[in-house]
């Protein structure tokens, strides 16, 4: 259940959003506010997961309101002014609804927010609880992992993962059939979950499935004739140790 608030200085707009929220089973409306200053006060004492906020409001506009937040919830901007769209996305908004918007538009936006919320919770559950407690690795005999991406859950065979590539807070899995899946999951957390006898971090941006390694040189690992990833300077010793331990040089 996503706890949300709606902020708009137009009563009709607030009533519309309230009505739309009531139709979505995983949304819980905590409060409505007719100005951003009131919303600031509310967020001090109330945990909120998602904020619907108009941009063009008196006293404190929606963009400055979001900038002022220290612990930012997810944000969906609602406005009649399309020129604010770029500014909104610079603040990592989940979406931008241009008034007047339909329930279908609203539903698509909140589905995106819900997917992001679930993925972040999945990421938190896999992250280390403290500096001393690492993520629990998958059992060695586990064949599949479930990956949330594109509003669905995909079952991915671990042996089909060729390599993983960091894209900020996301990870792109490159698979055996030349497809890829991008999910909200940091590479560091993937490193702690995937079995270490099969996967190795070889660069700050890459983890490779060692069983798909075809060849290597001093600076790269070749996973096929056309695909290779770099070996980072900080990872070369660990990689060489793996080679020395597991292969006989002829």
Image (tube, grey):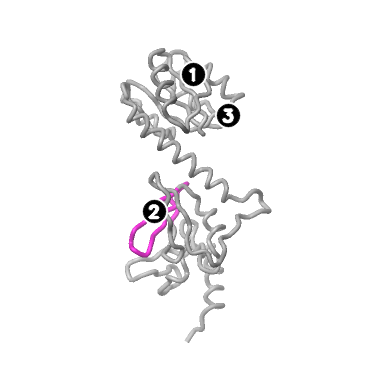
The relative height of residue 2 versus residue 246 in the rendered view (above or below) is above
**Residue sitting nearer the eye, 129 or 61:** 129
Q: Which stretch did the figure color magenta? A: 165-183
Secondary structure under the numbered disc 1 in the rendered image: strand
Q: Quadrant of residue 22?
A: top left
Of pointers 3 and 1, the one earlier in the residue sequence? 1
Q: Which one is in front, 100 or 245?
A: 100
Give the mark nearer the N terminus: 2 vs 1: 1
Q: Report x, y in % for residue 18.
A: 43, 21
* Secondary structure category for the residue under label 3: loop
Residue 7 in the image: x percent, y percent?
Answer: 46, 20
Q: Magenta residues: mostly which secondary structure?
A: strand
The circle on residue 181 is: 2
**Outermost residue, bottom direction?**
250
Q: Decide which of tag 2 and tag 3 comes sooner along the chain.
A: 3
Marks 2 & 1, CB-CB < 8 Å contact? no
Residue under the point 34% across and 63% down: 177
Q: Which mark is residue 47?
A: 3
Q: Residue visible at 43% across and 30% down?
A: 24
The image position of residue 117, as x and y in percent, is 49, 39
What x and y, as percent, mark residue 217? 43, 73
Residue 221 on the magenta span: no
Horizontal arrangement in the rendering, residue 130 relative to residue 63 (left or right): right
Secondary structure of residue under mark 2:
strand
Residue annotated with mark 1: 32
Circle 3 crowding by C-alpha within 10 Å: few under 14, some 14–19, many from 20: few
């Amino acid at each position: 259940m996503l706890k949300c608030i709606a902020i708009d200085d137009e009563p009709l707009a607030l009533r519309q959003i309230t009505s739309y929220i009531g139709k979505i089973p995983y949304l819980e409306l905590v409060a409505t506010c007719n100005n951003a200053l009131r919303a600031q006060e509310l967020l001090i004492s109330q945990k909120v997961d998602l904020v619907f906020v108009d941009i063009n409001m008196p006293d404190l506009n929606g963009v400055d309101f979001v900038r002022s937040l220290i612990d930012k919830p997810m944000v969906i901007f609602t406005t009649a002014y399309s020129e604010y769209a770029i500014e909104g996305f610079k603040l990592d908004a989940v979406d931008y609804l241009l008034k007047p918007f339909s329930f279908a538009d609203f539903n698509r936006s909140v589905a995106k927010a819900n997917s992001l919320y679930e993925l972040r919770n999945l990421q938190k559950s896999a992250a280390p609880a403290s500096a001393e407690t690492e993520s629990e690795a998958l059992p060695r005999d586990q064949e599949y992992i479930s990956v949330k991406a594109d509003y669905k859950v995909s079952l991915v065979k671990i042996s089909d993962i060729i390599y993983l590539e960091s894209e900020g807070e996301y990870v792109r899995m490159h698979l055996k059939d030349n497809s890829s899946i991008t999910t909200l999951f940091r590479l560091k957390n993937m490193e702690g979950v995937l079995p270490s006898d099969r996967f190795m971090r070889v660069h700050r941006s890459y983890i490779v499935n060692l069983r798909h390694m075809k060849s290597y040189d001093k600076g790269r690992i070749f996973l096929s004739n056309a695909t290779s990833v770099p070996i980072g300077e900080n990872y070369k010793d660990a990689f060489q140790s793996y080679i020395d331990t597991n292969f006989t040089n002829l």
